[in-house]
Amino acid sequence: MGHTLLGVLGLFLLNTLLYGHAEAGRRGVTLTADRTIIPLGGRVTLTCSVEDPAGFKYQWFRQTSDYSFKTPLQTENVDQSYRVISQGGKYTCRGWSSEPRVITPDSNAVVIEETGADAVLEVTEFTLFEGDLVTLRCKNRTSQRTMRATFYKDGSPLQNRNHQLSTAGEMTVRVSVSDEGRYKCQFADGTESEERELRVKAGRRRVTLTADRTIIPLGGRVTLTCSVEDPAGFKYEWSRQTSDYSVKTLLQTENLDDKFRVISKGGKYTCRGWRREPDVVTPESNEVIIEETVPNKAVVTLQPNWSEIHRGETITLRCEIKDGGDTDWEYEWRTTSSEKPSNQNELSIRSVSASHSGDYRCKGRKKREKSSTDWSDPFKLTVSDKPQSVLTVSPSWLSAGASVTLNCSVKDQSAGWRFYWYKTVPDPSDNSYSYELLPGSSSSGTEQDSYIVHGQTHTAGYVCRAGRGDPVYYTDYSQPQFVWSADFHSSASLTVSPDRAQHFTSDSVSLSCEGNSTEWRVKRLSPEDRYLSDCTAWGTMTGSTCKLKTYWRSAEVYWCESGSGEFSNTVNITIQAVSRPERSSFPVLLIVGLICGIVLIILLLLLYRYTPSKDTCFKRPIQSENSNTDHVVYQNEAQCDTYDSLLHGPQHIPEESIHSNVGTGAADGQGYKKIANTLKLRYSMVIKTIQRFNRTGSTQIRPRHGQPKKMSSRAQRHIQRLSLESRRMSAASIAAEVEGVGVSLSVLRPYTTLHQIGLHGCRPRRKPLLKMMHKKVRKQFAEDK
């Protein structure tokens, strides 16, 4: 009983949703006709009455027989509740509203019969488009027997053309605009039908097939949509091809009215629309290719499989299909780099560059099927700069019977590198070296990253490089590294004048090359920074002799290289930054003494000239307490000496005497300014001296408290020299350079030191973006607005 009530309630709610009201009973929809028989050449008017019709539009349907499909009639004015017809059949109507969505039940059926001739021509009342396929049928009203008929257009018989198919009582025409007109048919016994109008619209009917996606994932589905222009009354037909060479097959459809179709297999799909009574078929839609994802997995691999790829190498990216079998595959690549891959499974790049860096993905597609793999995981390719080998030698200085061990290293040591070993051969003509393979070193290189040289007794240079791949990709050569020997030999030797290892910045040092060559160059290498240079950078080369510029401290290794490719012995030379202690300084001291004596004599003459006499030290007026008269009192010699000592402190004056004179001066009303004028001293000096006496009880300047000076005079001179040599050098850079010689400074210290010699930093001139006249013009413009 409960299930029955729920069912009744559900039907009630459904009726309310579909028909727009919840009142008891159904909405009344009635179809009436002014007559039920159409006379020959006549018409009948149908009227559709809907209960409570406000806002309703009308839809009409017709059946040609009890067994045919109900087809909707094309309506130009859907708001009209009446319709004029000229063909017989079973008619129904109903009402509908879009806002809200309401559809009434179908009305009662009204059967309309035609009278007149027994021949009846069936022609669609819908407007056709160019390219539609329409079937004209000539039927006998009183007989079901199929009879041959002739078809006429605008009174003229139709000729059987290529685009028309004629059978007994039927003609199929793929219409064009020229086929528009009035048609009739005639049986062999002379019976004719009434004329019927066929309307054709210019342009082809748009039939479009779309898909929500073009690739079916594993276990997934894709929805196809067939859209037909002016779709009233159309049903839908679907077809599929499994490959470009297969036959197109129709798909079975349960619901012909549904323009959507869900598929789970790949292929090439098309659709079209069709109508019955009379038959109308649209052109086919566009093709949509749907790919079905197969479970095989695509993987991008790199050959050679090195962890790091360098600029200029040859590589191959390969798309591999796991468990792909012998199936013929086509390949598709995607990449974020500038490379444009082909549809092959291998992508070869002969000289890779930074533009090839990026992510690479691929997928496989079966050639004879519409199925493919998923996209592979991205393979990231990073192209680095060309590497340079690094060579180390041990030991640096040769000893009797010792062997030399060379070690060559690359950034990625375990990536299939082979190592090549060379010795350097000097070439003075272009200030460079040529390289020769070491004896016993194979042209194909060695797998080991070390090489031992036996029997080396003289100075020599070595380089190395690494290579891998086919063709071989080489790194850059390493920097030359040298092993040194102090032993002389006749073919090339180096002598130093003066012949000692330690020199000074004031010395003149010459390096001479001797041996079996006319072309020479002198080389120098700093063991600290491994910087290699020749005489032209730090000296003057004349013939086979290099004169060394000893301006700076240094400790380097020197040797000669001949034009015939030989090295001389090697010497260590250290240059000190101080003068030699054994050099006599008597001439310098004599000149300094003479200058100091002359200056002292001039100072004594000036002192004698401007020193006042004892009797006229100064005088002061004294005003007595009982009278307004002033008395001029001359200070005695002791007072003058006391003040002079107080102000200048050249000699020691007893504290009692200084205190007494200060008290006397204060009691007499002598001011600081008057004392300064009398003694010809600065006013500020007098004030500071007397204040110091009052504060400390002594005129002597005591030592300052605080930290000692942080910077020596030598560091100050170093700062000045750096600034004068490079005017664009910043204070921070100067501080860093000075710290390199063992003095720690702040950035402000170079500013103070440079200001003392009149060097001030400068900044670029800043010009205002808006001048005053621009501001006035803008202000005037704003006020005018």
Image (cartoon, rainbow, N blue to C red):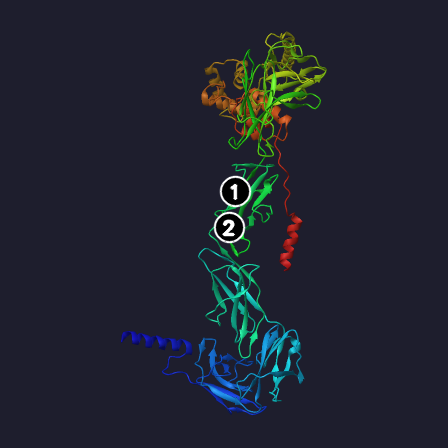
On the rendered image, what quadrant is the N terminus found in? bottom left
Where is residue 301? Give x, y as percent.
Answer: 52, 42
Q: Nearer the viewer, residue 763 or 254?
A: 254
Give residue 398's quadrant in the image. Answer: top right
Residue beneath the point at 61% across and 34% down: 471
Vertically, is 680 above or below 195? above
Residue beneath the point at 57% across and 63% down: 287
Total marks shown come to 2
Please tell me whether mark 2 sits on a helix, a strand or a loop: loop
Q: Nearer the viewer, residue 121 or 303?
A: 121
On the rendered image, what quadrant is the C terminus found in? bottom right
Q: Nearer the viewer, residue 319 or 751?
A: 319
- The amino acid type found where label 2 is placed reads Trp
Residue topped by disc 2: 375
Where is residue 510? Give x, y as percent.
Answer: 67, 13
Where is residue 53? Give x, y as percent.
Answer: 46, 83
Vertically, is 256 above or below 376? below
Q: Residue furthest left?
A: 1
- The amino acid type found where label 1 is placed reads Thr
Please tell me whether mark 1 sits on a helix, a strand or a loop: strand
User: What is the CA distance from the residue labelled 2 to the residue labelled 1?
Assistant: 14 Å
Give residue 582's quadrant in the image. Answer: top right
Residue beneath the point at 63% across and 58% down: 783
Q: Earlier in the sequence, mark 2 or mark 1?
A: 1
Vertically, is 690 above or below 588? below
State left or right for residue 68 relative to residue 726: left
Residue topped by disc 1: 301
Callout 1 crowding tier (Cα within 10 Å): few <14, some 14–19, many ≥20: some
Tell me the tag on residue 347. none
